[in-house]
Amino acid sequence: MISKRLKEISKYTKGYNLLLDVGSDHGLLPIYAINNDYVKDAIASDINYKPLIKAKENFTKYNLDIKTIVFDGIPETDADIIAICGMGAELIIQILEKTLNNAKNLKRLILSPNNDYYILRQYLNNKFNIVWEEVIIDRNHYYEVIVVELGNSNYSDKELYFGPILLKTRTKEFIDKLNKDLSTLKNIVDGITNDNKKIEVKKEIEMIEEVLCQDTL
């Protein structure tokens, strides 16, 4: 069964022709996107063959002729939209750095790492424009979705940390995530022995409190 996270991610594929799902696992995102007429066709890729065996079974179950590719990153493709979700930000950056040039017709990227959103936005800055962002709560976990298109952005450090779109939309999910992050940081700050790390965490606390205070003004 497709997760809430993937359902929300799928809506950003609407209106595109060919979806490439990198790290597709069991192929649930391509299935959902095609069955809801968001895209015309899809490709499922994964670094490992075994997950794609299950994906093929799922494609057969829904009578879909979706191509599968075993590849480390983005294979050569005509896809105009690519989703890279459910992995670490550092791995997503490696994939983009090494294999993005394989996508000659790319118009949009949908990125949803499991962590380190700030690091990912730092990499995207000056290379892509962030056109939309969303915080999704799925199974008691908070995930950010970052939708980007090629462009020459120049975001501030605050925008890179929180997300330029999220700072504007200020959804309930975004505020809830900030409160959770703030509570976590306050619980660990006193136990940090490295002075530089403690200064860094205190700065993060101040930044989050500043953003949250805007709701009380």
Image (cartoon, rainbow, N blue to C red):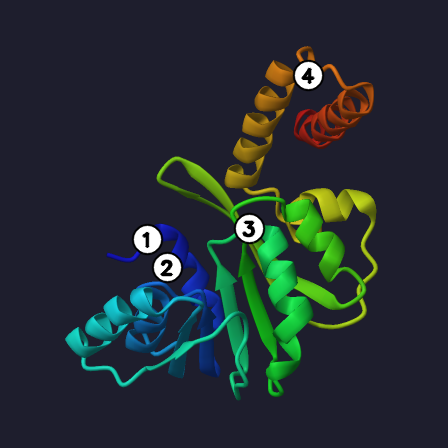
Q: CA distance from mark 2 to mark 3?
A: 20 Å
Q: Are marks 3 and 1 in contact (CB under 8 Å)?
A: no
Who is closer to the viewer here, 132 or 140? 140
Disc number for residue 3: 1
Q: CA distance from mark 4 to mark 3?
A: 24 Å
Q: Residue at x 43, y 38 (%)?
A: 141
Task: Inspect the image, locate mark 4, and give the three-letter code of the amino acid beneath it.
Answer: Val
Measuring from the top left, give residue 18's x and y in whole percent: 45, 83
Q: Are marks 4 and 3 in contact (CB under 8 Å)?
A: no
Name the front one of labels 1 and 4.
4
Name the front one of labels 2 and 3.
3
Task: Inspect the image, locate mark 3, and give the three-letter code of the amino acid beneath it.
Answer: Gly
Q: CA distance from mark 3 to mark 1?
A: 18 Å
Does the image show residue 14? Answer: no
Q: Which residue is mark 2?
A: 7
Q: Earlier in the sequence, mark 1 or mark 4?
A: 1
Disc number for residue 88: 3
Who is closer to the viewer here, 71 or 168? 71
Measuring from the top left, give residue 62's x and y in whole percent: 19, 76
Q: Is residue 210 left or right of residue 93?
A: right
Q: Secondary structure at mark 1?
A: loop
Q: Which residue is mark 4?
A: 189
